[in-house]
Image (spheres, rainbow, N blue to C red):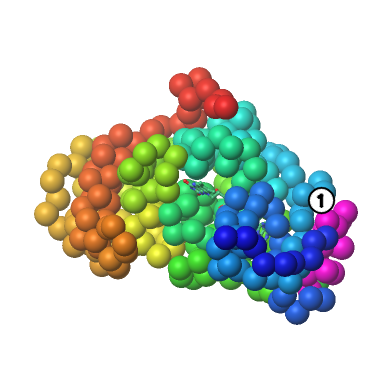
Amino acid sequence: MKAPDFAYVKPASLEEALEVLSSSAGSAVPLAGGQSLVATLNLRLSTPDLLVDLGAIDELRGIAESDDMVRIGALTTHQELANSPIVRRHLPLVAKAIRHVGHVAIRNRGTLGGSLAYADPAAEMPACCVALDASIVIAGRSGRRTVPAVQFYRGLFDTDLRAGELIVEVCLPKQKPHRLWGFGELSRRHGDFALAGLAAVAEIDGGRIGMARLVYFGCTDCAKPAQGVAQKLRGQPLPIGRLEWLPQAIASDLNPTDTPGLKAHTKVQLATALTVRILNDLQPGPTGSRDPAIS
Ligand SMILES: Cc1cc2nc3c(=O)[nH]c(=O)nc-3n(C[C@H](O)[C@H](O)[C@H](O)COP(=O)(O)OP(=O)(O)OC[C@H]3O[C@@H](n4cnc5c(N)ncnc54)[C@H](O)[C@@H]3O)c2cc1C
């Protein structure tokens, strides 16, 4: 199938892009890496009149650190994230997760902003941003606003973005020394979208789980913390064994539905297995030299 006809512009600045987007009354869409959008055009799931290519807007690129924060421009590619020493040192969860995003050709073109805006329920980056309590900086004609990632996701492919707005950057708190992290996913082949995945941060006190932020993907409609599971895990000694209550708690938090080829019950079983596996293998700090840059 071929995409329907559309017009194309490539603005040189953020201001110009916002002007074009806001004056086209919802009939224009931003184009970043095109790794999701072009497929939806070709399948005619999306029929915009105008594509606004963000590729020339240099202010949307780059990874920078301040005292306690890492700021990542929306146009930063998955591969740039994977290769960044700042990300590997201060955001080990992201460094691990990014290796699971598609294949190298997709990581070379796909962007962080595109992934967050597209809000695929099986995508890794939305779950990491929610787990890490990131903030998403959004620009529109009337100015900028900052939305906590946990409030950004509202449902299946549904976000807080309004027509004419763009994600400009994402601010992620640096890994704190006393926090542990864990990431894992189950997919049919490496690089496929996850059937079930989990991005987790937790604190351990005297060998017991304290605060935990568990964000599942692939087995639920959008990235959000599983609060009921976290509550029930508080005080649980590590390593955890077979917890009779866990599948039911996961099912209540995630409310998974049957999808072609995968029953809701199976999603819960996969998420349960991942939860035990990841909580018993929480990592203390940066991935460092154990996870070298990938190509
Ligand atoms: C074969 C294949 C396998 C894949 N596997 C995975 C995977 O395992 N995990 C995963 O997470 N992803 C996967 N992807 C998707 C990939 O990560 C995409 O890069 C990502 O979903 C979209 O990023 P993009 O830059 O390509 O955005 P685009 O495709 O250009 O845009 C996606 C959507 O976001 C909007 N958008 C883009 N940038 C912005 C912005 N700055 N502000 C507001 N809206 C914006 C666009 O208008 C569009 O609606 C896969 C893709 C393919 C083709």
- Residue 238's spot in the image, x, y percent? 22, 39
Residue 174 appears in which quarter of the rendering?
top right
Vertical relation: 106 (above or below) 85: below
Outermost residue toward the top in this view: 289
Vertical relation: 156 (above or below) 116: below
Please provide the residue range marked out in magenta: 10-22
Q: Which residue is painted at 40% across and 59% down in the image?
A: 225
Can residue 171 be spotted in the picture? no
Q: Which residue is painted at 74% across and 71% down in the image?
A: 49
Q: Is residue 98 magenta?
A: no
- Residue 228's spot in the image, x, y percent? 29, 63
Q: Residues within 10 Å of mark 1 (few under 14, many from 20)?
A: some
Q: How many marks?
A: 1
Can residue 251 be spotted in the picture? yes
- Quadrant of image for the N terminus: bottom right
Q: Which residue is painted at 52% across and 60% down in the image?
A: 119
181 displayed left or right of 174: left
Secondary structure of residue under mark 1 = loop
**Is disc 1's CB within 8 Å of ligand 1?**
no
Q: Nearer the viewer, residue 229 or 44?
A: 44
Q: Which residue is painted at 49% across and 59% down in the image?
A: 120
Kindly identify the amino acid type of the residue bearing the numbered disc 1. Ile
Q: What residue does disc 1 label?
A: 57
**What kind of secondary structure does the magenta stretch mostly adopt?**
helix
Residue 53 appears in which quarter of the rendering?
bottom right
27 displayed left or right of 45: right
Residue 207 appears in which quarter of the rendering?
top left
- Quadrant of image for the C terminus: top right
